[in-house]
Image (cartoon, rainbow, N blue to C red):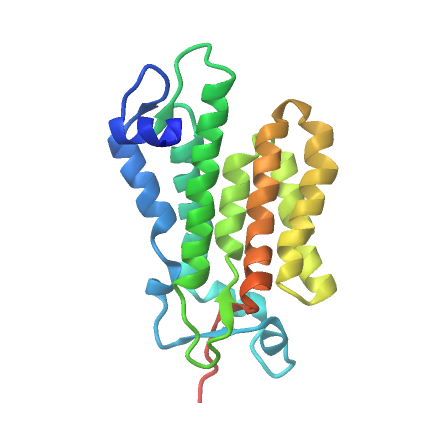
């Protein structure tokens, strides 16, 4: 028996959720399009230890020269906003509560979880097949779209980036973000516990996938000139 939200998605319009086909297609394209298709031969994939070596380009400078990395958080933000905001792809009737709200949240989390997996697995590292792309920019855009309080979203991002520098690991980005959401989000946004719980699940997902498939995170950096 199909999940109610899947039935509504197939029918596009039911007494509960209302799906706007145009916005939904736009959201899916933005979220599921692999970032790696924008990489050229001038981009290589490196683990944190490789990208932080003293004779390499500065990581920040390297990122600044790859246009796709600037586009990634923006498209993730717009795609998540189109999918999650009640005025776009998935709308609820006035006064909706209970099961309908949970069904929409389930649908949103399911699509975003799939999108994260697509970003991680769609990029192959020819130098090391035992790696996965760390969806850092994508995750930042997703955080800002899902967390209603900008201050919490900014703090979460700052803590996540600081965790990378402190622990020298891309896993720390996602785990640091989890700590920030749990420590500040649940304190300042007590009325949004379901959404914050969904954000935590999505942040933990990349780390769990890496552990299960036994691969390491890599990020795109500009190749050094010969």
Q: Quadrant of residue 5?
A: top left
Left or right, 100 with respect to 180, comes to left
Left or right, 129 with respect to 25, comes to right
Residue 150 appears in the picture as rendered: no
Please identify the quadrant where the N terminus is shown.
top left
The image position of residue 115, as x and y in percent, is 42, 49
The image position of residue 105, as x and y in percent, is 48, 30
Please identify the quadrant where the C terminus is shown.
bottom left
The image position of residue 162, as x and y in percent, is 70, 56
Relative to residue 77, is residue 84 depicted above or below?
above
| Residue in the image at 28% along x and 27% along y | 20
Relative to residue 78, is residue 7 depicted above or below?
above
| Residue in the image at 57% along x and 37% along y | 198
Q: Quadrant of residue 22?
A: top left
Q: Along the line of sight, which residue is nearer the eye, 83 or 99?
A: 99
Residue 214 appears in the picture as rendered: yes
The image position of residue 66, as x and y in percent, is 43, 65
Relative to residue 95, is residue 100 depicted above or below?
below
Relative to residue 23, is residue 114 depicted above or below?
below
| Residue in the image at 70% along x and 32% along y | 186
In the picture as drawn, the residue positioned furthest to the front comes out as: 1
């Amino acid at each position: 028996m199909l999940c109610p939200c899947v039935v509504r998605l197939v029918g596009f319009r039911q007494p509960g959720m209302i799906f706007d086909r145009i916005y939904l297609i736009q959201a899916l394209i933005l979220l599921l399009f692999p970032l790696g298709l924008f990489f050229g031969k001038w981009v290589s994939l490196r683990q944190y230890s490789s990208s932080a070596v003293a004779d390499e380009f500065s990581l920040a400078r390297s990122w600044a020269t790859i246009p796709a990395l600037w586009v990634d958080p923006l498209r993730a933000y717009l795609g998540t906003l189109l999918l999650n905001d009640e005025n776009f792809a998935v709308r609820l009737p006035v006064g909706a509560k209970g099961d309908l709200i949970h069904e929409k949240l389930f649908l949103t989390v399911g699509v975003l979880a799939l999108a994260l997996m697509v970003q991680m697995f769609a990029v192959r590292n020819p130098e090391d097949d035992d790696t996965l792309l760390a969806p850092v920019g994508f995750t930042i855009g997703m955080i800002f779209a899902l967390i209603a309080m900008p201050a919490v979203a900014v703090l979460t991002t700052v803590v996540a980036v600081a965790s990378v520098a402190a622990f020298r690991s891309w896993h720390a980005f996602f785990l640091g973000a989890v700590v920030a959401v749990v420590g500040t989000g649940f304190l300042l946004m007590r009325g949004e516990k379901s959404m914050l719980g969904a954000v935590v699940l999505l942040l933990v997902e990349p780390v769990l996938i890496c552990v299960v498939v036994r691969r390491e995170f890599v990020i795109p950096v500009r190749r050094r000139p010969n």
